[in-house]
Image (tube, rainbow, N blue to C red):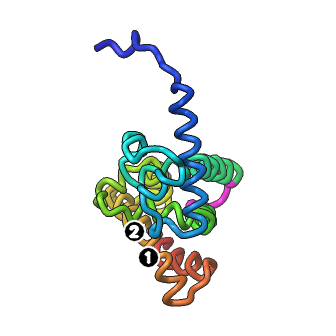
Amino acid sequence: MDQSNTTYRPERRDAAENRKRILDVAFKLFEIHGVEEVSMNQIATEAQIGAGTLYRRYRNKSELCSELIQDNANLLFEEIATYLQNHQSYTAGERLRGLMSLFIQFREKNVQLLTGIENSNDRGIEEQNKSPLYHRLHHILCTLFEEVSPANEPSFALFQADMLMSALRNDSYVFQKKVRGNSSDYILEHICKIFIP
């Protein structure tokens, strides 16, 4: 089918109202109870919509959290782009450290939603790694790692980015904070020691 002839159909008003109500209710419930403690049925009940309506729009909490975090993720990537542009004279390692600092700040502000995205029971690691947030951040990290060590094979930069993203996953990060008692600054400093030569 020729995609150039398809027309964009705006969201129906009732669908847009349902979407806004779902997002508002979900955000409120997640803030009060935490993502893990809130069920999709609870969201539907509080939003005064049928469960079918909710599940037609969002198959799971992960999709719901992804939409809730989208604006903040866009702001993160704007901040990263500005940071990288304003610090072109810095070494790749210094820029990588700055990028990780921005991401850790983002993680701190969005811990509940990131938990919902990363800990969804019905998404494997392969699916989580396809998220736009993961993909965009991974691409930037690969580029910086290639610049840090240009003599290495490109596959090594890919490996480094994979391992760094694993280290920054919510479960690892929260474990370091809550179980080990490490501060965000401590985590940033020591991740840099591990990943930046």
Q: Which residue lies under the disc numbered 1?
A: 172
Residue 54 versus residue 163 in the image, above or below: above
Q: Earlier in the sequence, mark 1 or mark 2?
A: 2
Q: Is residue 34 magenta?
A: no
Q: Quadrant of residue 1?
A: top left
- Contact between labelled residues 2 and 1, with CB atoms less than 8 Å apart: yes
Q: Residue at x 60, y 65 (%)?
A: 31
Q: Nearer the viewer, mark 1 or mark 2?
A: 1
Above or below 9: residue 159: below
Specify the amino acid type for callout 1. Ser
Residue 165 position within the rendered picture, expressed as x and y whole percent measured from the top left: 43, 64
Magenta span includes 91:
yes
| Circle 2: element type | helix
At horizontal 58% and vertical 62% (from top left) the residue drawn is 110
Q: Tell me the kind of residue under disc 2.
A: Ser
Query: Please, is residue 65 above or below residue 38 in the view?
Result: above
Name the residue rendered at 48%, 53% in the picture: 45
